[in-house]
Amino acid sequence: MSASRAPTFRSYLVHAALPMLVGGLIYVLFRTPHLLMFQWFESLGIDGPIAAARVHTMPLADSLPEWVRFSVPDGSWVWSATATMALIWHDKGGWGRWFWVSLGVAIAIGSELIQLYPPMPGVFDPVDLVAYAVAHVAALALASRSWSV
């Protein structure tokens, strides 16, 4: 990738926004309504349309593998963060680039590992660690190879 050819707006949509959208939709459509975000939806007055959509999707939730419902959304966040930083820092080298490109996966892994120790909230899941690693590597590979997507 030469420094003269910058990533396009479409690259940001495909590699950063789309993974966040997919992960967000999995949370909204297939996760428990007891999550804090559902209170936010109610406060924003959008809980009705979301509840209506969930009527159609929740029967499918049990047929999805657990790793899709619980690990893919987290991996999608790492993918988005990694791709965003890779796209922003596409023409830079050195430690600064790798710091920013690795920050999202480092935060994700750190937050997962800290759940091993009470009284931290959450449940440690090694599948999440795999999702973070796969998402990070895939985002780097795909984002860096398709600047002009």
Image (tube, grey):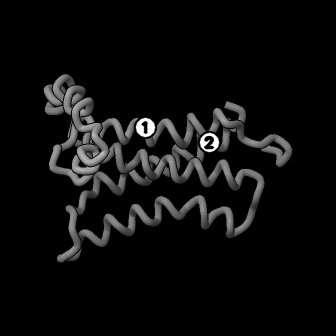
Which image quadrant: the N terminus? top right
Residue 128's place in the image compared with 10, above or below, is below
Q: Is residue 29 left or right of residue 92?
A: left
Tally of numbered discs: 2
Q: Is residue 63 visible?
A: no
Which residue corresponds to the image point at 71% horizontal and 37% vertical from the top-left? 8
Residue 136's place in the image compared with 7, above or below, is below
Q: Indicate the quadrant where residue 123 lies.
A: bottom left
Residue 147, given in percent of the width and then of the height, sits at 70, 38
Which residue corresponds to the image point at 73% horizontal and 66% vertical from the top-left? 94
Q: Indicate the quadrant where residue 58 lies.
A: top left
Residue 49, given in percent of the width and then of the height, sits at 26, 29
Dots 2, 1 in contact, CB < 8 A:
no
Q: Which mark is residue 129?
A: none
Depth check: give the residue in front, 24 or 42. 42
For mark 2, give the secondary structure. Answer: helix
Depth check: give the residue in front, 15 or 140. 15
For label 1, the crowd category at 10 Å Cα-Cα, with few meaning under 14, some 14 to 19 and many 20 or more, is some
Q: Earlier in the sequence, mark 2 or mark 1?
A: 1
Residue ID for mark 2: 143
Residue 112's place in the image compared with 3, above or below, is below
Which residue corresponds to the image point at 56% horizontal and 34% vertical from the top-left? 14
Three-letter amino acid code at disc 2?
Ala
Q: Which mark is residue 21?
A: 1
Q: Seen from this angle, which residue lies furthest right? A: 4
Three-letter amino acid code at disc 1?
Leu
Q: Marks 2 and 1: which is nearer the front?
A: 1
Q: Seen from this angle, which residue lies furthest top? A: 56
Give how far apart the Cα atoms at labels 2 and 1 are: 17 Å
